Image (tube, helix red, strand yellow):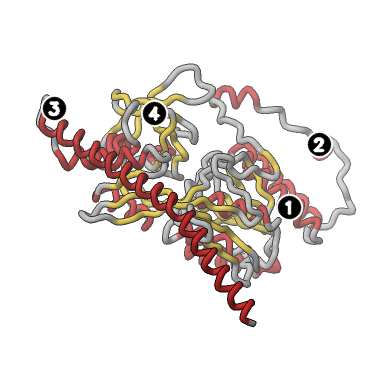
Amino acid sequence: MKKFITAAFGGVIGGALIASQLAAPLLAQERNNATSVYEQLDLFGDVFERIRNQYVDDVDTAQLIEAAINGMLTSLDPHSAFMPPDDFDDMRTQTRGSFGGLGIEVTQEDGFIKVVTPMDDTPADKAGVEPGDLITHVDGESVMGLTLSQAVDMMRGPVGSEIIITVVREGEPEPFDLSIIRDTIRLQAVRVRTEDDNVIVRVTTFNEQTFPNLRDNLREAIDDLGGAENLGGVVLDLRNNPGGLLTQAIRVTDAFLDQGEIVSTRGREEGNGERFNAQPGDMIDGKPLVVLINGGSASASEIVAGALQDHRRAIVVGTRSFGKGSVQTVMPLRGDGAIRLTTSLYYTPSGRSIQALGVSPDIVVEQPRRAAIEEDDEATPPRTRFENDLRGRLENQSMSEDERRQMEEESRRAEEVAALRRDDYQLAYALDILRGLTALNGRR
């Protein structure tokens, strides 16, 4: 026993000696790092004083500090930024669903402002702005070299006023101008409509209204069909949805899952992430689900699409999403401003990060560009003729009145599908998939 105690005690002393030997260089390195940081801060103070005292014009020191803070943040990634009090207020207003402006979600790329997506039925959408457009000039002034916040400020203005943006678009040989009239943007987070026995749920943004609107409108649509047993399936349209609140993305995903992980976040420190799981209860009782995405689907939209895809709960259709897989935390500061800082990445249930990669659809379906009216008329194929169109045809005497009505209804549906395919090819494709899945499940 004495030997055991001695050996153990010796081990502890030995461990302490080793630990102290290892700790000494680590502490020295930490002191050196701290000294280096203080030296850099002294350098910053020196430059600040020289600018303030020797620059050719008087400078606003508050603006100088603000620019320095913004420079630190924007050097990290395109989504970290300083938010002065006005910008912070605008952000809080947007998450509530009503604000003034053009109605575009933008980021920065190669010094230009890149359109993530125009929001539905906003001035930018009506003017023809498209996802991926690069804005090079605002009212004739170049945005090159400006921060994202400064460029956005240039695009702000009174409701009813005109703004001219110069756009570079892939596939167009030359930059071109678009005129937009500023307006108050009132986002309707969710729109729901039915096509036969299928429900189309269009989600335009993830703000505080999104899940409540989806829940209430989807329930109403299902009730109008006579209950879930009469529901064929649902198309969840997330195209051109720039994202928004993480909490709302989780709740929307949970609406179609009974169990399992929805999303996880991982930050700088190991074990500092979060994991979010679905609660029991699928609003459509396992009926077929198709999710539509495109290059304007970003952030929260990608969380929803990625989770439903990983759980094989939905077929994802369209084109690759934007690829914003980072999480920003808004941290209020003294003076009513805030910083938006990238603090973690999010991961889909299978463990994949979609940062800069996006969500790849299960079925790639491109949306054809809208042709000019005269081109459209020339490209319209001649109507197919059937036996029923021939003069002097034999009538089907065995056809009952019910069968005749069914044939007329099928013809009406075919015409509606053809019209939808001309207007929105991706949505028509998604509905075709739903009808096929419904037929496989035994419902016609």
Circle 2: residue type: Phe
Between circles 2 and 4, the one closer to the viewer is 4
Sequence-first tag of 4 and 1: 4
Mark-to-mark CA distance, 3 and 4? 26 Å
Disc 2 crowd rating (10 Å Cα; few below 14, some 14-19, many 20+) is few
Q: Position of residue 120 (x, y in %)?
A: 46, 45
| Residue 171 seen from this side | yes
| Amino acid carrying mark 4 in the image | Gly
Label 2 – label 4 distance at C-alpha: 58 Å
Residue tagged 4: 111
Marks 2 and 1, Cα distance to the nearest angstrom? 24 Å
Which residue corresponds to mark 1?
A: 435
Residue 287 falls in which quadrant of the image? Answer: bottom right
**Real-space CA distance between mark 3 and mark 2, rounded to the nearest whole angstrom:** 83 Å
Looking at the rendered structure, the secondary structure element under dot 4 is loop
Indicate whether 309 appears above or below 107.
Answer: below
Q: Identify the residue shown where x is 27% and y is 40%.
A: 39
**Residue at 49% across, 36% down:** 131
Residue type, numbered disc 1? Arg
State which tag comes first along the sequence, 3 or 4: 3
> Residue 20: horizontal and vertical position, in percent?
46, 59
Q: Which residue is mark 3?
A: 55
Can you tell which of label 2 and label 1 is closer to the viewer?
Answer: 1
SS of the residue at dot 1? helix
Tag 3: amino acid: Tyr
Q: Earlier in the sequence, mark 2 or mark 4?
A: 4
Residue 108 in the image, given as x and y percentages of width and height: 41, 35
